[in-house]
Image (cartoon, rainbow, N blue to C red):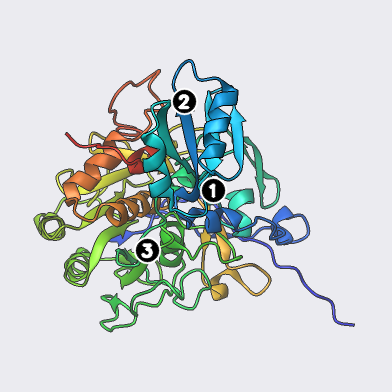
C-alpha cells in the first residue's frame, strides 16, 4: 500500500534584502521539518458557517416586537392587553420591563406596531431586532495561525522549535469589522510586486485580469518569486472557502502588476509605470510592499498622479531599522506602514520616522505562495516577517472602507485609518510617534457606522 506523505507549512525567516533600485524586504526559505512540524497535519475544518448565513439576514424580525407599558400598568393587565390585541406568543422580560409579543396573523408588523402605539397604556413599541454570531470564516488556518486578525493570547508554535508569545487583543480587530463589510467586488486592490500566482486556490477567483508585467514587457503578471502572491493573499485571499487562510478584504478583487523580477529587484521606472497604469486601470487601492533608498521626483510625481485619481496608496516602511523608504516616505500621498509583533510592540526591524502613519502586525504572518515555491511536500503557504506583511493588512482595510463608503476621497480614507488606530505604545510614546505613527490599525473602529470625519 502506498504511503501518504503529509504536507506541512514552510517557514520564512525575516531578512532585509533592500539593494540596488527596488527590492522586497522579506526572506529566503527556511523549510520546517516535516517530522517535528505541528503544522504537518491540516487543521480540522470544524468552524461552522452559521454566523455568515445569519449575518446575511435582515437585522430586524418581521413577526415580533418589544412592547413597553407605562408606569402603573401591572404585568397582568399588560399581558391581557396583548391577548385582546390577538398577539401571538407573549413573553415577559421583567428585568427590563418589556414584553415580547408576536404580531397578529392578520396584519403586518408595521401595522401591528402602529395600532399598539395608539393604546394610551403603551409607552413604546419596537421591532425585536435580530442578534447573530459575527462573521467568522471557516478557513482552517484562521483560528490556529492568523493571530494578526484575531489574537486570543497564548503561544503560537510554527516550524521546528519556533514559539511566539501572543498577547490577547494584539490584532487588527478583523472579526467585528467583517460584520460591517467583507468588501465589494467593485473595489480592486493593485499589488505592485513580483506578480501573483493566479492559479492559487486563494487567488484564482480574485484576480480581475492577468495584469501587467513591466519587468518582461507583457500582459501576464505571473509570480516567479513568491512575495507578490503572499502579499496579495494577506490582503484579499478567498475566504470562507474551507481552504487555508482568511484575507483582510475577502470580498475585494486583485489586480497583479509585476514591477519586481524573480529575485525581488526592480527599478524606479517600472514602479512608476506600474503606479500610473494601476491608477488608469481601475485600482482603488495600491499596495507597495517594496521600497528604495533614494528620493526621486519622478517617483513622487507618480504617487501624486495616482493619489489625485483617488487611489489610496499603502507602502511598507522598510526593514533595516533605519529611515522610512521610498515611496512610503512621500507623506502627502502615501500611507507609510510600520510593523508590530504579536504583543503589540514595535518590531525591531521596522524602519522608524516621522512619515510613519500606522502599523500592523508584521512578525510571522501566514500567507499563500506558489506550490512550486513551497515544494511538493509542503502546503502552499508560508510564515514570513516584515513590513511587507503589515502593509497589505492596511491596504485591505482601505479597500473595506472604500467598499462601505465609496464616496470618500483618498485623503478621507487615509484619515479614517490614521485616526481610528490604537495607540498601543501610549504609555511610553503618547500620540503620533516615529515608531508606529498613530498606532496599530483597528478595523472595527474604522468601519463603525458613525461619523468619523469632522
Q: Earlier in the sequence, mark 3 or mark 1?
A: 3
Nearer the camera: disc 3 or disc 1: 3
Q: Is residue 97 visible?
A: yes
Image spot of residue 22 (x, y percent): 29, 60
Residue underneath mark 1: 364
Helix, strand or loop status at disc 1? loop
Residue placed furthest toward the top: 72
- Which mark, residue 252? 3
Image quarter where the C terminus lies is top left
Q: Are marks 3 and 1 in contact (CB under 8 Å)?
A: no
Label tally: 3
Residue placed furthest toward the right: 1
Q: Is residue 259 left or right of residue 331?
A: right
Nearer the camera: disc 2 or disc 3: 2
> Could you tell me which residue is drawn at 54 percent across and 43 percent down?
87
Please tell me whether residue 251 is drawn above or below residue 213 in the rendered image: above
Query: 407 or 50, which lies in front?
Result: 50
Callout 2 environment at 10 Å: few (<14), some (14 to 19), or many (20+)?
many
Q: Are marks 2 and 1 in contact (CB under 8 Å)?
A: no
Q: Are marks 2 and 3 in contact (CB under 8 Å)?
A: no
Residue underneath mark 2: 69
Helix, strand or loop status at disc 3? loop
Q: Is residue 197 left or right of residue 46?
A: left
Amino acid at each position: 500500500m502506498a504511503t501518504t506523505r503529509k504536507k506541512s507549512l514552510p517557514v520564512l525567516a525575516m531578512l532585509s534584502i533592500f539593494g540596488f533600485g527596488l527590492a522586497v524586504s522579506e526572506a529566503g526559505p527556511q523549510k520546517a521539518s516535516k517530522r517535528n512540524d505541528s503544522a504537518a497535519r491540516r487543521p480540522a475544518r470544524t468552524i461552522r458557517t452559521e454566523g455568515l448565513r445569519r449575518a446575511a439576514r435582515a437585522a430586524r424580525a418581521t413577526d415580533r416586537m418589544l412592547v413597553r407599558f407605562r408606569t402603573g400598568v401591572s404585568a397582568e393587565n399588560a399581558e391581557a392587553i396583548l391577548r385582546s390585541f390577538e398577539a401571538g406568543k407573549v413573553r415577559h422580560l421583567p428585568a427590563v420591563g418589556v414584553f415580547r409579543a408576536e404580531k397578529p396573523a392578520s396584519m403586518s408588523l408595521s401595522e401591528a406596531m402602529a395600532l399598539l402605539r395608539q393604546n394610551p397604556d403603551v409607552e413604546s413599541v419596537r421591532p425585536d431586532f435580530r442578534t447573530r454570531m459575527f462573521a467568522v470564516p471557516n478557513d482552517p488556518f484562521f483560528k490556529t495561525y492568523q493571530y494578526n486578525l484575531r489574537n486570543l493570547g497564548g503561544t503560537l508554535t510554527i516550524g521546528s522549535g519556533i514559539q511566539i508569545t501572543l498577547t490577547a487583543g494584539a490584532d487588527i480587530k478583523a472579526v467585528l469589522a467583517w460584520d460591517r463589510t467583507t468588501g465589494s467586488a467593485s473595489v480592486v486592490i493593485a499589488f505592485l510586486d513580483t506578480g501573483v500566482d493566479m492559479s492559487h486556490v486563494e487567488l484564482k477567483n480574485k484576480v480581475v485580469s492577468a495584469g501587467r508585467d513591466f519587468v518582461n514587457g507583457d500582459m501576464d503578471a505571473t509570480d516567479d518569486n513568491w512575495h507578490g502572491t503572499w502579499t496579495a493573499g494577506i490582503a484579499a485571499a478567498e475566504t470562507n472557502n474551507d481552504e487555508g487562510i482568511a484575507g483582510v478584504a475577502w470580498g475585494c478583487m486583485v489586480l497583479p502588476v509585476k514591477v519586481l523580477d524573480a529575485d525581488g529587484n526592480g527599478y524606479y521606472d517600472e514602479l512608476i509605470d506600474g503606479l500610473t497604469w494601476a491608477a488608469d486601470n481601475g485600482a482603488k487601492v495600491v499596495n507597495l510592499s517594496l521600497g528604495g533608498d533614494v528620493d526621486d521626483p519622478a517617483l513622487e510625481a507618480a504617487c501624486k498622479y495616482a493619489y489625485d485619481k483617488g487611489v489610496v496608496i499603502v507602502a511598507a516602511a522598510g526593514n533595516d531599522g533605519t529611515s522610512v523608504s521610498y515611496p512610503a516616505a512621500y507623506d502627502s500621498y502615501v500611507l507609510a506602514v510600520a510593523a508590530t509583533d504579536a504583543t503589540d510592540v514595535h518590531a525591531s526591524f521596522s524602519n522608524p520616522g516621522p512619515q510613519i502613519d500606522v502599523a500592523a502586525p508584521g512578525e510571522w504572518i501566514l500567507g499563500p505562495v506558489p506550490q512550486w515555491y513551497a515544494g511538493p511536500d509542503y502546503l502552499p503557504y508560508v510564515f514570513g516577517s516584515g513590513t511587507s506583511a503589515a502593509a497589505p493588512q492596511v491596504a485591505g482595510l482601505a479597500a473595506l472602507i472604500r467598499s462601505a463608503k465609496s464616496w470618500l476621497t483618498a485623503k478621507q480614507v487615509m484619515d479614517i485609518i490614521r485616526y481610528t488606530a490604537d495607540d498601543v505604545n501610549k504609555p511610553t510614546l503618547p500620540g503620533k510617534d516615529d515608531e508606529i505613527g498613530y498606532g496599530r490599525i483597528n478595523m472595527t473602529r474604522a468601519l463603525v457606522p458613525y461619523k468619523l470625519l469632522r
